[in-house]
Every structure is written in structure tokens, then in C-alpha cells.
């Protein structure tokens, strides 16, 4: 009976360890992951940088 | 006597007639120029038709003789709270942009005509003005930023942004050219670009960045300590599996 209880405790402890570790790793990954960046490139022709005709 | 009088009368008539004919002859040249003037009219029309092409010689306003490329880089999603990120705007020279425009139509090659446009660098002092308007978010610097623009050189602007709360933030990145005439001192301003950006600030199920990071570190330690006694069991389990496979 006592051996069964200790086995049960071991399993619960293992389950908790895995749960806490997985949540912690998820938090760390979210907390330190680089932000997704958007890059826009727009060509500008010389006509767009021209003085308006008087 | 009668014969001589008859001759005199005839001579007189002939003289008068010749005078009349001469008068008519002198009068007719007035009509001839009208006929001659008719062909001249198309010439006048031709000159008037040519004259509209002359305004092409009107002075072309000066321009920057470079094709440039505007690159905007910003985070589309970032963590709300204490964390900040950077928005970068670069106005650089596009080396591949200075190409004479060409087109090929049914085998005929049409080459774009090169037009002499005065160089704006020679006539004006050029300053690039950039501004980031982002309502609800901390932006540094909040005011417009200026940088001189020189031939072949790029201009880069950086802003530090920090969202305090979660949500969707919309803003505009403005780029203007300020031109000051070197000779007259006259100032002009050209709007080159206005780009709308959207940045989403998020959190981790209500947890701020710092709290999430701290929880991650603490949880890893706690999870490691709780799981440490099982390392021996796990290793034994793995070795058993390997030895069974060998057999």
C-alpha cells in the first residue's frame, strides 16, 4: 500500500514538474522572442522630388 | 482737210482708249495680290501652329537627379508595457533606378528622351524632415526630425516607441523635403511620403512583459528542482530502452 502511495506521489510530482517547466519555457519564449517586423520599400522618382512649376 | 481731220480724230480715240486700257491695267494689280496672298495664308497658319511648341523651352523646375528608395521598418506586433522598439525610416539612393526609360512596340525600339532638368542640389539647400504621429503611444522624439540631404547620401531616422497598454495603434510616418533657395533664400516644402502604419500591442494572457519573463525564470528553476529527483529514473528508463533495442 505504502509503495503505491509513493508511486502516486512520484507521478504527481513528475506531472507538476513537467507542467511548470513547460509553462515557464512558454513564458520565456514569449518574453524574449523578437518582435515581427514589417518592411515597406517605396521607390521615389525624381519627379516626386521636384519643385512645383511656378 | 477732211482726211486729216478724220485721222486726227481716230488718233485721239486710239489715244483715249489706250489711256483707258492702261488705267484698267493699273487697276488690276490691286486684285492680283489677293490671289497671291492666298498661298501666304497657310504660312501664317503654319507659324501659328508651330508657336505652341515653343513653350517647351519654358524653364523646367529643378529636381533631385536621383531615384531614391524609401524604406520603412517597424514592428507590426510588440509587447505592451515597459518594452520599447524602434521604427526606422531610410531615404537612400536607388542605384538601379537611374535607367533611361525604353519601350519596345512591335519591334520598334522607342528610347525615352533625356530631358535636361536643373539639379536641385546646385540651386537649393535640401533638408529632409521626418515625423512619426502615433496616437496613444510614447514616441521619442515626438517632434519632427531634420537631416540635411546631400548628393548620393542617405538619410536615416529612428524613433523609439513604447505602448503602455494593449491595443491597436495607428499612425502616420511623414517625410517632407525642405528646400531653401541658395540665391534668394526662398523656402519651399514638398511632401514626399505619408505612410500609415498599424502596430498591435499584446500581452501574455494579462501578464506584462517583465512579469512573464520573471515568471518564466522562476518557473524554470522550480520545475527543475521538482523534476530533479526524477532525472535518475528518466535516465534509467532511457538506457533500458536502448539496451532492449540492442538485444
Image (cartoon, rainbow, N blue to C red):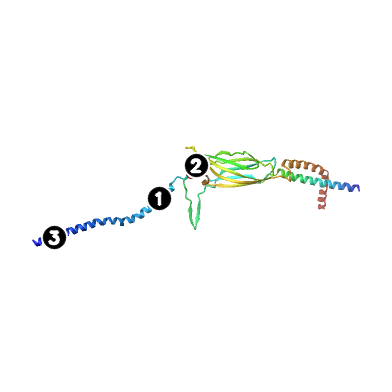
Q: Earlier in the sequence, mark 1 or mark 3?
A: 3
Residues packed near mark 3 inside 10 Å, few (<14), some (14 to 19) or many (20 plus): few
Q: Earlier in the sequence, mark 1 or mark 2?
A: 1
- The answer to which quarter of the image holds residue B90 is top right
Tag 3 residue: B9
x then y, percent, for residue B15? 17, 58
Q: Residue at x 13, y 60 (%)?
A: B9
Q: CA distance from mark 1 to mark 2?
A: 29 Å
Is B15 rendered above or below residue B96?
A: below
x then y, percent, for residue B195? 59, 46
Tag 1 residue: B51
**What secondary structure is marked by label 1?**
helix
Callout 3: chain: B
**What secondary structure is marked by label 3?**
helix
Choose mark 1 or mark 2, whichever is in front.
1
Viewer can see residue B234: no
Q: Nearer the viewer, residue B95 or B20?
A: B20
Q: Earlier in the sequence, mark 2 or mark 3?
A: 3
- The answer to which quarter of the image holds residue B217 is top right
Q: CA distance from mark 1 to mark 3?
A: 64 Å
x then y, percent, for residue B180? 51, 39
Tag 2 residue: B120
Q: Nearer the viewer, residue B174 or B76?
A: B174
Callout 1: chain: B
Amino acid at each position: 500500500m505504502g509503495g503505491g502511495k509513493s508511486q502516486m506521489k512520484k507521478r504527481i510530482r513528475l506531472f507538476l514538474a513537467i507542467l511548470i517547466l513547460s509553462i515557464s519555457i512558454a513564458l520565456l519564449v514569449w518574453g524574449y522572442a523578437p518582435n515581427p517586423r514589417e518592411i515597406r520599400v517605396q521607390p521615389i522618382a525624381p519627379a516626386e522630388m521636384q519643385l512645383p512649376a511656378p | 482737210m477732211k482726211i486729216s481731220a478724220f485721222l486726227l480724230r481716230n488718233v485721239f480715240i486710239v489715244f483715249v482708249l489706250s489711256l483707258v486700257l492702261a488705267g484698267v491695267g493699273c487697276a488690276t494689280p490691286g486684285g492680283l495680290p489677293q490671289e497671291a496672298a492666298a498661298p501666304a495664308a497657310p504660312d501664317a497658319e503654319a507659324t501659328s501652329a508651330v508657336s505652341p511648341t515653343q513653350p517647351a523651352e519654358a524653364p523646367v523646375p529643378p529636381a533631385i537627379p536621383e531615384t531614391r528608395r524609401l524604406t520603412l521598418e517597424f514592428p507590426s506586433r510588440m509587447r505592451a508595457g515597459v518594452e520599447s522598439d524602434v521604427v526606422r525610416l531610410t531615404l537612400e539612393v536607388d542605384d538601379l533606378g537611374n535607367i533611361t526609360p525604353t519601350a519596345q512596340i512591335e519591334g520598334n525600339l522607342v528610347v525615352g528622351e533625356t530631358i535636361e532638368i536643373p539639379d536641385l542640389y546646385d540651386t537649393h539647400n535640401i533638408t529632409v524632415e521626418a515625423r512619426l504621429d502615433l496616437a496613444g503611444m510614447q514616441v521619442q522624439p515626438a517632434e519632427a526630425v531634420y537631416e540635411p540631404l546631400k548628393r548620393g547620401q542617405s538619410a536615416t531616422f529612428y524613433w523609439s516607441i513604447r505602448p503602455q497598454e494593449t491595443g491597436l495603434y495607428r499612425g502616420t510616418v511623414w517625410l517632407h523635403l525642405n528646400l531653401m533657395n541658395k540665391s534668394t533664400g526662398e523656402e519651399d516644402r514638398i511632401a514626399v511620403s505619408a505612410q500609415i502604419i498599424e502596430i498591435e500591442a499584446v500581452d501574455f494572457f494579462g501578464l506584462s512583459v517583465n512579469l512573464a519573463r520573471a515568471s518564466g525564470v522562476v518557473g524554470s528553476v522550480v520545475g527543475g528542482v521538482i523534476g530533479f529527483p526524477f532525472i535518475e529514473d528518466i535516465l534509467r528508463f532511457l538506457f533500458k530502452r536502448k539496451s532492449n533495442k540492442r538485444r
